Amino acid sequence: MLTRRTMIAGLGALTCLPALAQSDWRQSIKEIRFGVSSAEHEAGAIARNQPVIDYLTGKLGVPVKLYRVSDYAGLVEALRADQLEFARFGPAVYSLGRRVLGDKLQPLFRDIDNNGQQGYYSVIVVRADSPYRSVADLKGKNFAFADPNSTSGFAFPSYFLRKQGFDPQNHFGGTVFSGGHDNSVLALVRGQFDGVATYQVNEASGVVQRLAARNMIPAGATRVIWTSPLIPSSPFSTRANLPQGLKDAFVAAMKAMKNEAPEVWKVYTDGQVSAYAPAKHEDYLDVIAVTEELEARRKQKPAG
């Protein structure tokens, strides 16, 4: 059974829209549910997403509710059960979703950052005052991945480290899943791990930068020692079985947010996104190949 928590309250009564403004989808869809994963801590997720939910409610003319699930895979399960209309998750979770849902899962759009980049990176970070300068220096040390279904927090670093001769199971002294990117970085700074895998868009935007901006860690507390190849931006996705009018209205509302609700846009994107670009399944074929290789390795493990 899917565990989820509703994070939105007080939507208030909606003003009746004129009959001519009511499109067909509003006759059958009385509530829109938008799902996010547990990558960000609870307070941060509410602060980031609540203004967007309020904006969408006004823009679309029906109540929009935010759902957080207990893990990344929970979003896929919710979509499969028709318990969500829209969700945003990493490319690895999209890959999982396609294995589970096939064409029922449809990518819609993704970020373009302020430099025109349509992606981000997995990075390995250590404390700035540590002696570690490379992955080789972390031999025998404690290491944390974010989540087994995280692209930047597990799939990409696990895959590419092995390609570079560092099998995480043998290279590090011990590895754990922290439960999320924020958890990993916070625990690193507290000294619980020697290195962690997380994500970064550029030197000004990423998990570390966001936590520092919120005074949750000191500025300059960490240092990047490894960077992956570019990962395509996380897709905003939907169920293919929804009315096309609803999907078009959602995409249009999200694209209009920068001009119509600039403060909401700034909070939601950390000011690091310039626009949204269309996303298609073919954009994620490389990520799917990485996750399929990881899945094959899991199946090859002897039971024990």
Image: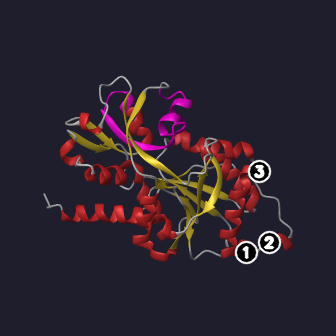
Q: Marks 2 and 3: which is nearer the front?
A: 3
Q: Secondary structure at mark 3?
A: helix
Label whose residue precedes the other's in the sequence (3 or 1): 1
SS category of the residue bearing label 1: helix
Q: Which residue is mark 1?
A: 27
| Viewer-proximal residue among 215 and 273 | 273
Type of residue at label 2? Answer: Gln
**Residue 240 in the image: x percent, y percent?**
56, 75
Which residue shows up at 36% across the image and 53% down it?
A: 156
Point 30% across, 35% down: residue: 134
Residues at marks 2 and 1, CA–CA distance in whole angstroms: 8 Å
CA distance for labels 2 and 3 = 24 Å
Q: Where does the magenta region start and end?
A: 188-217
Cβ–Cβ below 8 Å for labels 2 and 1? yes
Residue to which mark 2 is pinned: 22
Label 1: how many Cα within 10 Å (few below 14, some 14–19, many 20+): few
* Residue beneath disc 3: 259
Residues 200 and 63: in front is 200
Q: Position of residue 142 (x, y in %)?
A: 25, 36
**The C terminus: image quadrant:** bottom left
As drawn, 152 above or below 132: below
